[in-house]
Image (cartoon, rainbow, N blue to C red):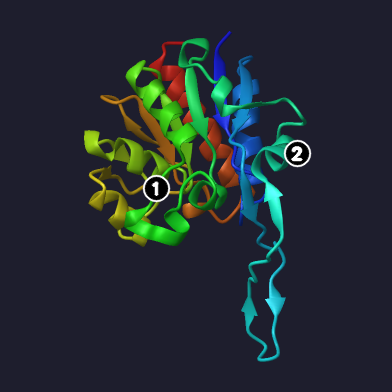
Amino acid sequence: MKNIAIILSGCGNRDGSELQESLSLMLAIDRRGWHYQCFAPEGFFEVVPHVDVIDDDDDAGTIVDTEQRDIFLESARIARGNLLPISAYRPADYDALALPGGMGAARNLSSFAFDGPRMTVIDSVTDAILDTYRAHRPILAMCIAPMVLAKVLGRYEVLLTLGPDDNQASHIARQLGCRIQACGPTDVCVDDEHSLFSTPAYMAATHISQIFQGADNLVQALQTKIGL
């Protein structure tokens, strides 16, 4: 039975892990009789409300709240409490590492949402990605999460998708050294040389059915790669 490590970044598409992507990924893994273990970093983040607010000018917008929440505790909501700190992750114990999307990847795992091409990735996530890469284990990423890989692994000229190849994220990933492949909502970009697998999810999708199909295609590509 294969064992997949999943890094979460909170709970909610605007400030944490995207739930539909996370659960689709977990289901795609479970349907194959495999096991997954969720991990998350510790630390706090600013809450972004998940309901659009109409202001006095009748303009819809999202307000960033001053409320602080714990990334680890929020991630535990998705993992149903079965969550470990990233410090406990060891590539030798897992067959692959996976990162679902959601703005938590851009706000909590990295500073991409704030700093763009000057982004940083938190040390524990950088270490997990680099240790996995150097151990020649596959890495999977969905939606905006490939941007985290772009920062950490761009020096190796890895191939990734962030949906369309002409959006801002794709342009920045190129600046970081990556090669970019345009993909539709359920497509999978496979970098055989570096064992990286990515799918656009909500960078291109408009329906939850596309999210599950993309996640299932992602795991299927991994299954094909490892010969099962």
Q: Position of residue 173 (x, y in %)?
A: 31, 50
Q: Residue at x 73, y 25 (%)?
A: 82
Q: Amino acid at mark 1?
A: Thr
| Residue situated in front as seen by the camera: 75 or 30 | 75
Q: Residue at x 24, y 52 (%)?
A: 175
SS label for mark 2:
helix
Left-right relation of 164 to 21: left
Q: Residue at x 49, y 25 (%)?
A: 97
Q: Residue at x 47, y 53 (%)?
A: 203
Left-right relation of 78 to 183: right
Q: Residue furthest bottom?
A: 57
Left-right relation of 180 to 22: left
Asked whether residue 205 is in view, the answer is yes
- Residue 38's place in the image compared with 162, above or below, is above
Q: Position of residue 44 (x, y in %)?
A: 63, 48
Q: Position of residue 210 (x, y in %)?
A: 56, 46
Total numbered labels? 2
Question: In the rendered image, which residue does mark 1 sit on?
Answer: 120
Q: Point out which mark residue 77 bears.
A: 2
- Residue 45's place in the image compared with 127, above or below, is below
Mark 1 or 2, closer to the camera: 1
Q: Position of residue 212 (x, y in %)?
A: 60, 39
- Residue 114's place in the image compared with 53, above or below, is above
